[in-house]
Image (cartoon, rainbow, N blue to C red):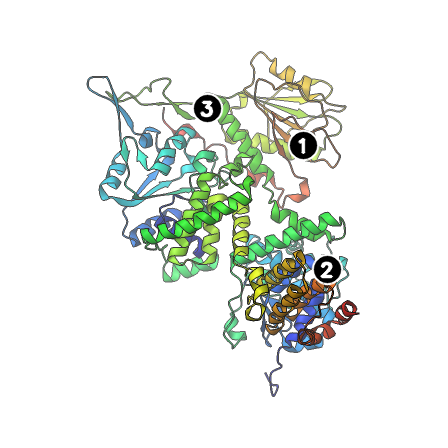
Amino acid sequence: MSTTVRSALGVAVGARVPVLLWGGAGLGKSSAVREMALAAGLPCETVIASIREPSDFAGLPIVSPLGDSVHFAPPAWAQRLAESGHGVLFLDEISTAPPAVQAALLRVVLERTVGDLALPDGVTVVAAANPPEQAADGWDLSPPLANRFCHLDWDLDAREWSEGILAGFTSAEVPPLDEQQLFAELTATRAAVGAFVMARGHLLHAHPGNEASAGRAWPSPRSWEMAARLIAATAVCGAADGVRAVLVAGAVGPAAAAEFLAWREDLDLPDPEAVLLDPTSFRLPERGDRAYAALAAVTAAVLANNTAERWEAAWLAIAAGTKNGHADIAVAAVRSLIAHRPDGAAPPPQVLTQMTPVLKTAGFFDVLTRGRR
Amino acid sequence: MADDRPVRLDLTRLAAARLLAAESHPFLAIALYALTPVADSTRPTFAVDENWRLFVNPQQLLDWSVQEVAGVLLHEVGHVVRDHAGRARTAIVADESARFLWNLAADAEINDDLRNAKVVLPKPLVLPETLKSPPGKVAEFYYAKLTEDGHTPDFAVADCGAGCHAHSDDPDVHVSAPLVAGLSSSEALLIRRRVAEAVVIADGKQPGALPGGWVRWAEATLRPKLDWRRLLSAAIRSSVAAVSGASDYSYRRPPRRRVPRIVLPSMQRPLPRVAIIVDTSGSVGEADLQRAWSEVHGCLRTLGVRRDLLTVFAADVAVRRLTGPPRRQMEFLGGGGTNMATAIETVLQAPVRPDLLVVITDGFTPWPARKPPRPVIVALLPSTLPRPPTPSWARTVDIDAADAAPDDGGPAQRRPSKTQGATHAA
């Protein structure tokens, strides 16, 4: 469980997307971040947000000797990060920071600007927070600040922890991401995200109604942009499916993420029109539910424009299903075809023979005979 | 195995059973097809793991009737679709006997719905009645009941696998052939969502035709409900912050500590006055009222709202200010109907106007026609009867009925009230 979260943390840091780790006190969030930075050879500056003042992030206003201007002086940690050119800025305990400090953090998190000093591009912001209901003096994260992070839930598996304490904990790995490759991939994922948002307009900007959810991930143009970058990064470094799902949910919230991932999965189905043109070379997906979806798409395409030729082509495509050991899935597709048989069309007898054993065992044989009269 | 040769997995029989199962539960078709069957003759019957691999004892597949196999498929797919493994982790099912109890509880949850759908299942069958529990509940409920009872019921029930209780007994021991991968957790999540959507669509077309457990599960999956305590405390927290800018930095007044040439903000901590109006009309249930009251009170105390700045009013036919310091347990006497419109007006006419109003009510009341000059939070007590909507200018938090909350022991939820933001030196 938390292996996925740990890889997700690594990918997000590699893609330089701000991450926020949520978890109770004592779960080792802070040490995990420091160890990850150490393993990746990145300098790590830890700043505990709850004991800081706004001026630590917005810069300390210093009146010039003449008294005619104000300069915002950056604190030492920001100067050290600026000098090294890359690194991790770790903001600990940000949910216990008072609202004014959270407001000052906005520019640091998104624009990497502290006072009058711009942090270099190589700096990633990682934050950690205790859920407000677990911290006595906790505030819910203000929605604008929450929306600038990819939220990851940091939990520990008892078994994983016991293995870790015996054999040593593995730190999160920051994968090397080639900037050019990432850019190329980003063009493709942006297109996918754009097409999805076009289809589901209500998910472009869906601010949740209550404070508790608004302090977490929710969809907005900014968080979709972040999701696109994270998806591109998982594709470049070949991360597991689970990691991608966690990251997308962390950016736009679980509901929008599930809808997006389901939509994207459907894009991978074979094009039914192409299948009908060349049904004999059609290969059914291995996974049963994907096979079911593919066959349903083929039969739906036939029913939308039902000619004898297309109807018979669908049968040949279904035959691929019976060969794969998915005879029962093929039956489901066949039934809707039989109900809509165009005049002069006849089902290929070999497909029916292949289905017969399953139908007989199920005591369902009359399904086909009834259809054929 | 002592047999001369192992029994081969009869895929035709399995496909036929799957056809019957998908036929009787069309909304589960996609989940049934997503199971990857693996022959495993060391398991007594059928089992699933968290990757949606279905372990099938080939001999058992032949011994049961096809109808029974279909029923068992629906049962096993129920475990993975309802995410019993993930829920077992949340319920902290740790050792072997707990695993057995959880397996029983999860079986009861599934079989309850399968029985209502008249599905044929092989005996012995675990049902809510077998566990001496009422039907229509979730596995967590049955599990809590079983652990409370303290004795392990002696049933010979087959282990449903890691897909039920999240503890995998090493699969290498059982299966010699290299294992197929099965589904990843995110793929499983997507299938769960699709099933839930299918349930909602089917239920909309033909209300009442689907077993109630499936409908409740789908609603909870698609619209996860947040804990009302969390929502209420978040609403109160942000209102207190907005009303008074409590414990925040401000440049309005210079700090006492001066540094030459540097402008520092100072810590401002104005104290908010909060009025709580408790609906004491005859329609309000005492138990619900106490739960809401202790939560509101605990939350305000945690936020550092001083006792003397907290006023409590009881509103029914008249509005009375309750004297004496507000405590965690209070007795609210009253009766008759309520008019919140006049109650809010009266409270706001007090010599020292409160900065924030928290109203605990069951909602059977008229409301002020215009937005009051102070923010209002409404803690809405549960009710099964239709009632007027709460006004849009109030922030409403629905309080769940008592038995929906898994633990109703209030004190564990509340934080000690001594840790407050006052440590920030001014």
Same chain shared by disc 1 and disc 3? yes
Q: Whole-Å distance between the Cαs marked 2 and 3?
A: 55 Å
**x%, y% of residue B275?**
59, 22
Q: Residue at x 25, y 36 (%)?
A: A76
Foreground: B142 or A306?
A306
**Parent chain of label 3:** B
Q: Residue at x 72, y 47 (%)?
A: B204
- Residue placed under numbered mark 1 in the picture: B289
- Mark 1 or mark 3: which is in front? 3
Q: Amino acid at mark 2?
A: Leu
**x%, y% of residue A30?**
37, 46
Q: Which mark is residue A50?
A: none
Q: Amino acid at mark 3?
A: Gly
Q: Earlier in the sequence, mark 2 or mark 1?
A: 2
- Residue placed under numbered mark 2 in the picture: B114
Q: Secondary structure at mark 2?
A: helix
Q: Quadrant of residue B73?
A: bottom right
Q: Is residue B425 left or right of residue A250?
A: left
Q: Is residue A336 left or right of residue A290?
A: right
Q: Residue at x 72, y 35 (%)?
A: B383
Foreground: A159 or B373?
B373
**x%, y% of residue A26?**
42, 47
**Parent chain of label 2:** B
Q: Quadrant of residue B5?
A: bottom right
Q: Measured along the vertical axis of the image, is residue B213 above or below residue B413?
A: below
